Image (cartoon, grey):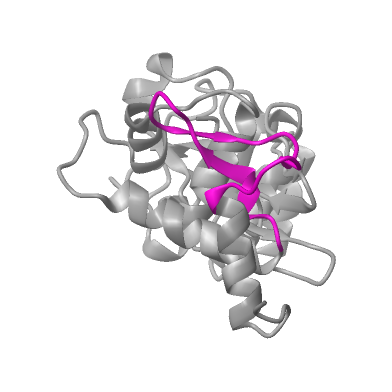
Amino acid sequence: MSLPSFLWLSASACPPARWDLRYADWTIVFPEHRKEAPDPLPALLDWRPASRPELWSGIVEPETIVAVGVDDPADRERLIAGGLGDAVGTQIVLVELAARLLRLEICAGKLPRKRAIGPLELDLFYRDARDGKGWIGLHPREFALLWRLAETPGLRVSRRELVRDVWRLDHLPETNSLEVHVSRLRAKLAISRCAWLVRTHPDGGYYLAEERLTKSFSRADMLDRQVAIGNGVLADP
């Protein structure tokens, strides 16, 4: 799955929670594992005096770096003038920090922020989907499932692939967590009359439908109707 990854450049082992993009389902990469990661990667440079790394300038290109914890406006101006992609203060919120990294040219060319699927538009920044009326309120895991299926529309994605790419597990769990998330995802899609987007493959796993079936009702079509009836959109015949 092509969800974003970021390089953490700091003398501290992990980012503080307010900067930790893993809470937004990004993947963290540490300098010692840099060669194992896809190239190139956007990087967060910890500029706090006690955590600022001594050797960072040669690890990645400066335009791929967002320095975080730079509270002095003069320092921010100097770093950006020196070629860094961006520099932000200590109190930046997680959503804004993610947006700053996504704005870097390295991310813009590598990963689309938005994807159109059927009547919906997926937005990687907000980790939600919207129809003509507004956001449909996806849970981050539901969004990750839908985004993963949208990467290969019409093609089967096995349970093992989904568990690996969305849950980041190398083994199939004994629970039915995947099926529960798919069911909840379909229920939310059904409110926008598009539960048909996520279909169960005859060989197992799921796939993203490229067009709605018109000759017969699928289980997703039935769910669309049931949810629509429950919300007063349709009258029960």
Residue 20 shows in this picture: no
Figure quadrant of residue 125? bottom right
Judged from this view, the residue extending furthest toward the front is: 237
Magenta residues?
193-219
Q: Would you place residue 146 above or below residue 73 in this image? A: above
| Nearer to us in this view, 18 or 51 | 18
Figure quadrant of residue 161? top left
Q: Position of residue 11 (x, y in %)?
A: 33, 43
Q: Position of residue 191 (x, y in %)?
A: 65, 69
Q: Residue at x 68, y 32 (%)?
A: 111
Q: Residue at x 44, y 57 (%)?
A: 183
Q: Residue at x 75, y 27 (%)?
A: 109
Q: Would you place residue 233 above or below residue 100 in this image? A: below
Q: Residue at x 64, y 45 (%)?
A: 197
Judged from this view, the residue extending furthest toward the left is: 174
Judged from this view, the residue extending furthest toward the bottom is: 232
Is residue 173 toward the left or the right of residue 40 in the image?
A: left
| Nearer to us in this view, 51 or 100 | 100
Q: Position of residue 5 (x, y in %)?
A: 50, 35
Is residue 156 toward the left or the right of residue 70 in the image?
A: left
Q: Position of residue 100 (x, y in %)?
A: 68, 51
Residue 105 shows in this picture: yes
Main structural element of the magenta stretch: helix, strand or loop? loop
